[in-house]
Image (cartoon, helix red, strand yellow):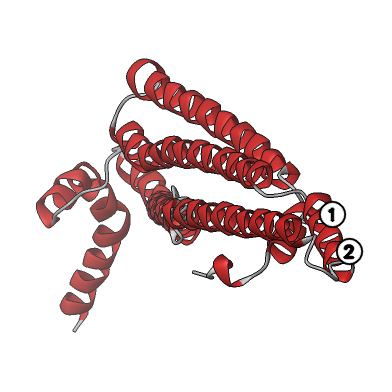
Amino acid sequence: MLDYGMFPPEFNSARIYSGPGSGSYVAAASAWNAIAAELQSAALSYQTVITQLSSEEWTGTASAAMAQAATPYAEWLSTTAAQAELTATQAQAAAAAYETALASSVAPPLIAANRMQSQQLQATNVLGQNTPLIMQLEAQYGEFWAQDAAAMSTYAAQSTTLTKSMTTIQPAPKVTNDAGTANQANAVTNATANSTATNTSKIVSNAATNTTNATTNATTQATQAATDPLTELWFLLTGQTVLPTNLGTAVNGYAPFAGLFYNTEGLPYFSIGMGNNFVA
């Protein structure tokens, strides 16, 4: 720390009186108080919303995950609000320290008057008649020196303490997952793909079923178309409506007409044969 006792009162008083003053400290304290109030209000609102959502309107795994992610942020708001309030208090203390140092320092006009009067007395002290007054003025000047040095040293010590006690505000914690957007996109893609695959499978299955049914119907119709003329012919020949499935059934169906075919076709040929034998 700087040793202000090394500097004359003109220097120390001029510095404290010509400085920017405590206005910047007061403005900073007011700003930090406003920030602290805003952060505290935000923390209370945030915590209220979390409590209402997780306990009254929204329950389940997603609600628990939301509360777990959002609670650290609400805690950060409260912590930062307290830090902002402390910073405001420190700024107010710095302003008070400045005002104390200013009030404790000797006003520059008094120092200038002391120096001017001492110089005038020394200039006219031909016979030493001014020596007692000069000594008084020098003693007063020494008091000014000590007073300014003490005021500035105290102010410097208080400022150093306040500066060291200030805490750094930490950045807000993340309440979201950096990969959340990508994960959501993948989930949507997978869900869409699964739905498409399922629909495609159903379409293929339905098409195969329809093809099988169409083939079966076509075969049945073709079979019916092929067998219907035979059935009709058999009906014309035998009077039966069902085609025979074996030789016995066919013979039985043909039996009633065997005599007719023999008399109309076989008997004439038999007579011709017999005549030829006798002639020979």
x, y percent for residue 264: 32, 53
Residue 222 is marked as: none
x, y percent for residue 131: 74, 62
Of all residues shown, which one is farthest toward the front? Answer: 127
Q: Nearer the viewer, mark 1 or mark 2?
A: 2
**Residue 204, visible in the rendered structure:** no
Residue at x 46% of width, y 60% of height: 178
x, y percent for residue 25: 67, 44
The residue closer to the viewer here, 13 or 211, is 13
The residue closer to the viewer here, 133 or 272, is 133
Is 84 left or right of 11, judged from the image as shown? Answer: left
Is 276 left or right of 75, judged from the image as shown? Answer: left
In the rendered image, which residue does mark 2 sit on? 120
Residue 113 is marked as: 1
The residue closer to the viewer here, 147 or 202, is 147
Indicate the secondary structure of the residue bearing disc 1: helix
Of all residues shown, which one is farthest toward the bottom? Answer: 280
Splitting the image into 4 quarters, where does residue 57 fall?
A: top left
For the C terminus, which image quadrant? bottom left
Residue type beneath disc 2: Gln
Residue at x 54% of width, y 30% of height: 42
In the displayed structure, 250 sits above or below 76; it is: below
Residue type beneath disc 1: Ala
Indicate the secondary structure of the residue bearing disc 2: helix
Of all residues shown, which one is farthest toward the top? Answer: 56
- Which is more N-terminal, label 2 or label 1? 1
Cα gap from disc 1 to disc 2, whole angstroms: 11 Å
Is disc 1 in contact with disc 2, using a CB cutoff of under 8 Å? no
**Within 10 Å of the Cα at label 2, are there few (<14), some (14-19), or many (20+) other Cα atoms?**
few
Residue at x 14% of width, y 54% of height: 246
**Within 10 Å of the Cα at label 1, are there few (<14), some (14-19), or many (20+) other Cα atoms?**
few
In the displayed structure, 59 sits above or below 170; it is: above
